[in-house]
Amino acid sequence: MSETAPGALEALVRAHQHFIQHPGPNETCAAWRSYCRDHDCEWVTTWDTQPYRETETNGLALSGHDRFDDIPQEALDRALLRIADTEGPVHLVILTRRLLEAAGFSRAGSRIQARIHERRAALGAQGLIRLEGEFSGRDEQFTVPCLRDWSNLPDALRQLDHVPDTELTLSLVRTVAEAGTLDRDMAMNDALHRMGFIRLTDNARDRLQDPLAKALERGLLVEWQEILEAGANAFRRPRNRREQNERVGTRLLPGATPSSRAQSRGF
């Protein structure tokens, strides 16, 4: 067997990562969601960014009723699913705002909130949407996060609590991958900025702790001496859960650097 030239493996890894980070039209977030809808993916890092797409509430066909309770169940369910398809994973606050706008109401009293909660839970129980805390969406929307620019949303909706953890994790992973290496605070600050949030406050830092922990746990990021670097799992192509469960983990050598750790996992 011939020996690998010094730096050759590093060059191959970088080339592989470059091609993944510059996706063609068939490798956009929308394309991966379509693929994973039928292939039961675990996680996909996507590399395109789109403006936040808001639901056109005029097309939800909920207006013309004196009371929210008068809206037919089928019409309300269709509207809820359409909002989830457009903005999912969508926070309950945004979901409620869209339904109110479509129905012509200015605020959600207890009865309106109760009905929205009831229909959301019913659709979740039917398997039509996936519910995670206050977020609603299709299964592939959680598995394949899309990075969105939130800067054009009203301040009341452009809140970090309204961003799903998966999207925050994605922003952190892409920010670190594109920079090469970053410390935690710089990674958090830049990840927020690329999504349309101005600066890293104490509350924002707290909000990003769980998404960062998940990125490290999944091997999407690795940390060495308080410096973050993209892990090999950030660049993997989709595999279904069965294939992933059959894989045997690679034991890392003590004292490995972030780059060697990432390479030891392969791609």
Image (tube, helix red, strand yellow):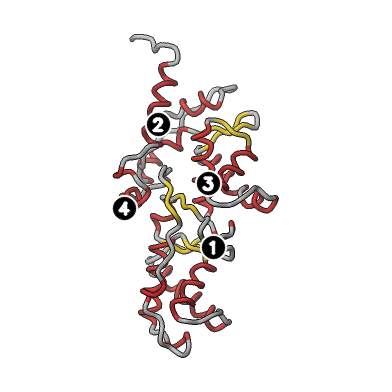
> Which is nearer the eye, 128 or 252?
128
Q: Is residue 68 above or below residue 7?
A: below
Name the image quarter holding the C terminus: top left
Q: Which mark is residue 34?
A: 4
State the residue lying farthest toward the bottom. 66
Lateral position of residue 86 relative to residue 164, left or right? left
Amino acid at the residue labelled 2: His
Secondary-structure class at tag 3: helix
The location of residue 2, given as percent across then percent down, is 34, 9
Of the two numbered discs 4 and 1 in the rendering, the one whose residue sits closer to the viewer: 4
Does dot 4 land on a helix, a strand or a loop? helix
Between label 2 and label 4, give the one nearer the viewer. Answer: 2
Circle 2 packing at 10 Å, graded few (<14), some (14-19), many (20+), is: some
- Which numbered circle lies on residue 18? 2
Q: Amino acid at mark 1?
A: Gly
Q: Nearer the viewer, residue 141 or 214?
A: 141
